[in-house]
Amino acid sequence: MIPVTIFHNPACGTSRNTLALIRHAGIEPTVVEYLKTPPSKAELQALLRAMDMPVRALLREKGTPYAELDLGNARWTDDELLDAIGRHPVLMNRPVVVTPLGTKLCRPSEAVLELLPVPPLPPFTKEDGEQVVDDGVRLGD
């Protein structure tokens, strides 16, 4: 069994498509509905390190309290931004996927393909009808 974790929001189409692509690969991931079970500050820091991503790149603006909290203001430290995500998990952009090949914010959903340690997959159709063709390129290839 291949260990895969997805930080998932079932209300998000990109997140649903990413989860469906993982399952299309024959993998049943650990699904963390991060709005119900938010990652700890230490877990967020570990995810960011694994993605080599700054905290601000993980922040979601649309449909969140980002503007009302003035999080675009440069005065906020990384530590304070992580605290804001802890208080308002909806600020965490999604989906974040962790596999043996790496960790990545999978936007668009087909970005997950390079993280899946499986041979090229047959074509997949997203919820909106768009077809995804797996080129077989994986991280570390």
Image (cartoon, rainbow, N blue to C red):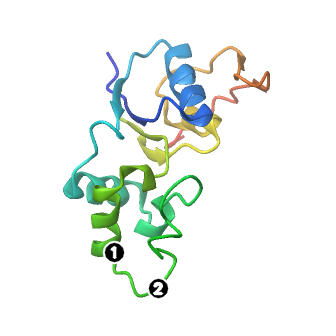
Residue 9's spot in the image, x, y percent?
A: 46, 35
**Amino acid at pointer 1:** Asp
Q: What kind of element bears circle 2?
A: loop
Q: CA distance from mark 1 to mark 2?
A: 10 Å
Q: Quadrant of residue 12?
A: top right
Residue 14's spot in the image, x, y percent?
A: 60, 35
Residue 89's spot in the image, x, y percent?
A: 36, 51
Asked if residue 2 lies left or right of residue 60, the reply is left
Q: Residue at x 41, y 87 (%)?
A: 75
Q: Residue at x 60, y 27 (%)?
A: 17
Instruction: Pick the residue in front: 73 or 32.
Output: 73
| Residue farthest along the right direction in this orientation | 130
From the image, tell me which residue sits under label 2.
74
Residue 128's spot in the image, x, y percent?
A: 76, 25
From the image, tell me which residue sits under label 1.
78
The answer to whether mark 1 and mark 2 are in CB contact below 8 A is: no
Asked if residue 136 lies left or right of residue 118, the reply is right
Q: Quadrant of the N terminus?
A: top left
